[in-house]
Image: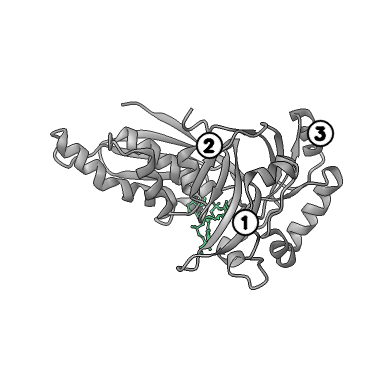
Amino acid sequence: MTEQTWPAPAKLNLMLHITGRTDDGYHQLQTVFQILDFGDQLTFTPIPQGIKLTCNNPELETDDNLILKAVEQLRPYAEKAAALNGQASNVTGWHIHLDKRLPMGGGVGGGSSDCATTLIALNQLWECGLTTEQLATIGVSLGADVPVFIHGKTGWAEGIGEQISPYELPELWYLVVHPDCFVSTAKIFSDKALTRDCEISKIRDFLAQGGPKRGLNVMQPVVLEHYPKVKEALDWLIQFCPDARMTGSGSCLFAPFDNEREARKIALRCKWPHFVARGINTSPLIS
Ligand SMILES: C[C@@](CO)(OP(=O)(O)O)[C@H](O)COP(=O)(O)OP(=O)(O)OC[C@H]1O[C@@H](n2ccc(N)nc2=O)[C@H](O)[C@@H]1O
Ligand SMILES: Nc1ncnc2c1ncn2[C@@H]1O[C@H](COP(=O)(O)OP(=O)(O)O)[C@@H](O)[C@H]1O
């Protein structure tokens, strides 16, 4: 086996409503996930045994990295597959290098996407034979956002974000701005001021209200209240695109454009870290 590089794309939440809570305190969401053609990259290189994780950001070389959590979840299936193939429990070792390109704590799902890519890649490399549904079930135990990256489709999501109905949206261009601050997802979900009683809606309501160009994110007012840096960046972006808004629990903001040229023109004037990406209906991970 030789070295292989796998993509871990970003996502945006084009809208995000909270309709209630589950018994274990998680929030029931209705959201539109938009997969982007930009993200992290994971390179898998065979080594005699074990797993070694390196990253261009050494802070991420820890046992808490979702990549290593994904490895641990898959290992029992790999050992079983190796035993069935007559290799005792001697599974191939892999050096995984994470090329971190996505902002962290930005609401673009980088950690979840790295986790999903690891599950899909090692399921193949270790010949575990798990189905997409089985991988998504393992994924949701590691993070509510992991399943959308396993399924790899833009679409409507409910439940805690794990029940996904693919839906083909116009593949617009997005300027994504990172106001250089980390927002804790758990902190925003636990804020008293968060609206948790949105009316149940359908994707047709989202489409009727302007589709990818418009959408309400109920987490946005809470984040703007606590993080002035996010508000400052949103105020700037709104001058060029009145429908600019926040993704997930922030801190990233995005503005949709019909073409790349428009998005890049505004990007040239942006003083915060940012990237321009195209919305795509199918993740490069599964296509
Ligand atoms: C808000 C969203 C929108 O896509 O994205 P991000 O801003 O994180 O990218 C997600 O729901 C985040 O998913 P993810 O980041 O995987 O969350 P988890 O690790 O499972 O949970 C982090 C924290 O958020 C809370 N949480 C998460 C999802 C959910 N539906 N309800 C919750 O209450 C959990 O209680 C936990 O304290
Ligand atoms: N592979 C990873 N990439 C990024 N963050 C990770 C990863 N594994 C674990 N984390 C942890 O997850 C948190 C943020 O996750 P991230 O996916 O960047 O945020 P968000 O879900 O807001 O986009 C950070 O606290 C970070 O330490």
Q: Is residue 230 left or right of residue 5?
A: right
Q: Mark 1 points at which residue?
A: 200
Q: Mark 3 points at which residue?
A: 265
What is the secondary structure assignment of the residue under circle 2?
A: loop
What is the secondary structure assignment of the residue under circle 1?
A: loop
Q: Which of marks 2 and 3 is in front?
A: 2
Residue that appears at 28% across and 44% down: 50
Query: For residue 207, which quarter of the picture?
Result: top right
Label 1: few (<14), some or many (≥20) within 10 Å? few
* CB-based contact (under 8 Å), mark 2 and mark 3: no
Label 3: few (<14), some or many (≥20) within 10 Å? few
Q: How far apart are marks 1 and 2 (CA)?
A: 22 Å
Amino acid beneath label 2: Lys
Residue that appears at 59% across and 53% down: 30
Can you see residue 103? no
Amino acid beneath label 3: Lys
Residue 34 marker: none
Q: Nearer the viewer, residue 280 or 29?
A: 29
**Could you tell me residue 269's position as x and y percent?**
82, 40
Label 2: few (<14), some or many (≥20) within 10 Å? many
Q: Nearer the viewer, residue 39 or 138?
A: 138
Q: Mark 2 points at which residue?
A: 153
**Could you tell me residue 103's position as x and y percent?**
61, 48
What is the secondary structure assignment of the residue under circle 3?
A: helix
Q: How far apart are marks 2 and 3 (CA)?
A: 29 Å
